[in-house]
Amino acid sequence: MLDLATRVYNHSFKIDPIVRSLLDTDFYKLLMAQTIFRRRRDTRVTFGIQNRSTRVRLADFVDEGELREQLDHARSLRLSRGEATWLRGNTFYGQRQMFAPDFMDWLEGFRLPEYELEARDGQYVLTFHGPWIETTMWEVPALSILNELRTRGVVRHMGKLELQVLYARAMTRVWEKIERLRALPDLSIADFGTRRRHGFLWQDWCVEAMGAGLGDRFLGTSNCLIALRREVEAVGTNAHELPMVYSALADDDAALARAPYDVLADWQQDYGGNLLVMLPDTYGTSGFLAHAPDWINAWTGIRIDSKEPIAGGEEAIAWWRSRGSDPREKLAIFSDGLDIDTIESIHAHFHGRMRIGYGWGTLLTNDFRGLVPDGRLDPISIVCKVIDADGRPTVKISDNPSKAIGPEAEVARYRRVFETPDADAMPVLV
Amino acid sequence: MLDLATRVYNHSFKIDPIVRSLLDTDFYKLLMAQTIFRRRRDTRVTFGIQNRSTRVRLADFVDEGELREQLDHARSLRLSRGEATWLRGNTFYGQRQMFAPDFMDWLEGFRLPEYELEARDGQYVLTFHGPWIETTMWEVPALSILNELRTRGVVRHMGKLELQVLYARAMTRVWEKIERLRALPDLSIADFGTRRRHGFLWQDWCVEAMGAGLGDRFLGTSNCLIALRREVEAVGTNAHELPMVYSALADDDAALARAPYDVLADWQQDYGGNLLVMLPDTYGTSGFLAHAPDWINAWTGIRIDSKEPIAGGEEAIAWWRSRGSDPREKLAIFSDGLDIDTIESIHAHFHGRMRIGYGWGTLLTNDFRGLVPDGRLDPISIVCKVIDADGRPTVKISDNPSKAIGPEAEVARYRRVFETPDADAMPVLV
């Protein structure tokens, strides 16, 4: 039976919006936003898109007009009453009223700020200038839009049957990964794949599949809208932008050396429990851990991001021991470029030695590798990073030199201040 | 957007019919029916279901009431005007008006006759008594109904996501086979999978996928309804029931020895061209070919069914040569238990030495092997065979003794008359 109403309604779409809600973002953006709101809301911060997969010339096949339409649509969004009620009333990480009334009042009035867009050398230069509290909110929608427009540009040329086979293969692939995950003892895994997903509907399906396949071993999703609609946990912690901005604002080397710890000091005023997971790699994990003040010993865990995961986990265990903690009571969250093989080897190596969590991103929600010719649906390594704060350039070094960001002289200064060792560059997969 | 009308309409189903048209049958049934109609329409013939996969106790999980509802629904069907117009007006095998007006008049008035059903030892004994022209028409709907009721019995306990994954895996499997088929030079392949399909919608999807993946290397489908709706060729030739009934009706050994050739003599009065494909294995291929009258040398091809395909193809080539024909102008149709591996090895062995066609059945339209626990969707070897004709038992020996049918004494007599050699039994897969 033809659903005439749906067909006619679909005909009259002006655009088919990619981002349909301000909650279609990662939970960590809201957590960080509240911290920023309380302390640094008016710091002028620039964010910018960087496509590290330069071979993929996005501007050649993502139409600029369509991109502007999608970005403009995202700017028209306001938090709905139901969404605000959920944020105000829901329990996150076991805590009620995680978001304070003043922050919620601000968020209910919030709209995404202006953007600057131009195409240059086959890439889009997409930049956001303004108060940190506003520009920070662009990261996830900007990335989701670019990724899904790229997807749409490929799938619009495919026939109905090709599409069926494409998604059949992708579903089969995800499900086979989930079946392998089921074999891992004491698994705890979450979806961290909003930013670089194939598309919203596909991420939503992946979350459904993870829940159906893993039960309570699936911790939840970083996507707030999907968490709300599917009634699963919204999860996330914090990202490099906090230490990067705090560090850029430091007036001298001593303040710079303190800045990453100032982030944690502020954070633990706002959050507790399983949200006390530090991200130590912004300027090199080893230096960060070596110089960490004693009060950080009480934190719940460490996120192991840019470091090779086995080495990163061993370093965390050694550090906890050196600080008199039992690693088995501590939490390591692995979140960089995970796929089923890496998850299995991390689990085989560390299971029983510490608590382990996985934040599974791009290769959960966008593993279309090889499913169309020339890898045109393979995920790309695209990020939206903070570039400057109150006019000062930001720097990121990480444990993987190929992810370093910032002017050369500043990078050198940071390396000196944070005693960042030279490390071998690892290829950036996603 | 909820399609309320569809939901409400679906709610009010009394049953969801499996067979919705008399054309949801194999094309060879109509070809044979016309030959029967012209010569032996009033012969009393009994057909009966036999489930060779005795481990699958169909009566234990296919509800008898539901089975009766489906069979009764099939009995309520009449050829629609559009369907009759298609049979009368369409071109089949390049020929117009393949079905004569008197046969079409009969078919337009036809309904499926009564059936007898009881459950015994975990299996259904489902039998059809009556004029051959009527009982022959039950074969395909009876088998489709039993197979799809079995499918429904399994899938009704599955959740939405499990179903999505099930069909995603099955689609992926079919498509990967099609991609391998694309690599075969000069391929010509048809769907022969109506009888033992997973379900109607699934067969329809398989036909769509074969067309999309293979273009004109996909010859068509044996399913008349799908051929009509998708505007692809309806294909098929003839089956063992013709020589089995002709042989049962033979009054002495000399008439018995002639009977299989009488079938071909009648058939070539009715059909020509690529429909002149003989099925030589009913009482053993070797004897059939050795004693074939010279006029059979003019036939287009041979269907290689119960014999091991490489041996069967070599035998056909040797026979054509012995009769002074060039095998490269002859057609061999392989149709028994085919899957992608067997197709590839047959093609590798025979390509270029003769024309080759594949009638791909169960493992195209019902390859759900291993996709649910305990193989509960694995295809079963179920057939609907002629049992007696005018009160005389029918016999089938074939090149594979495990497929032999008939009373022991009659089988011995047929073996003697047809000089059937002893052959090794091959396992019956599907």
Image (cartoon, coloured by chain):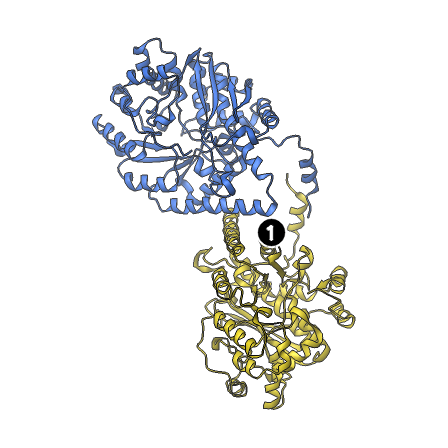
Chain colours: A yellow, B blue
- Residue A269 appears in which quarter of the rendering? bottom right
Amino acid type at mark 1: Ala
**At numbered mark 1, what does the secondary structure look like: helix, strand or loop?**
helix
Left or right of B132 on screen, residue A141: right
Give whichever of B283, A105 is nearer the camera.
B283
Give whichever of B258, A67 is nearer the camera.
B258
Q: Which residue is mark 1?
A: A212
Q: Residue at x 35, y 22 (%)?
A: B397
A93 shown above or below A392: above
- Residue A253 appears in which quarter of the rendering? bottom right
Q: Mark 1, residues whose alpha carbon is within 10 Å: few (<14), some, or many (≥20)?
A: some
Report if residue A125 is visible in the image: no
Give whichever of B90, B201 is nearer the camera.
B201
- Rendering coords of residue A344 (x, y %): 49, 61
- Rendering coords of residue A334 (x, y %): 54, 67
Query: Which residue extends farthest top?
Result: B251
Indicate the quadrant containing the N terminus of chain A: top left, top right, bottom left or bottom right. Answer: top right
- Rendering coords of residue B281 (x, y %): 33, 25
Q: Chain of mark 1?
A: A
Left or right of A35 on screen, residue B198: left
Give whichever of B62, A379 is nearer the camera.
B62
- Rendering coords of residue B203 (x, y %): 50, 37
Q: Residue at x 50, y 15 (%)?
A: B129
B63 shown above or below A161: above
Left or right of A105 on screen, residue B337: left
Left or right of A86 on screen, residue A186: left
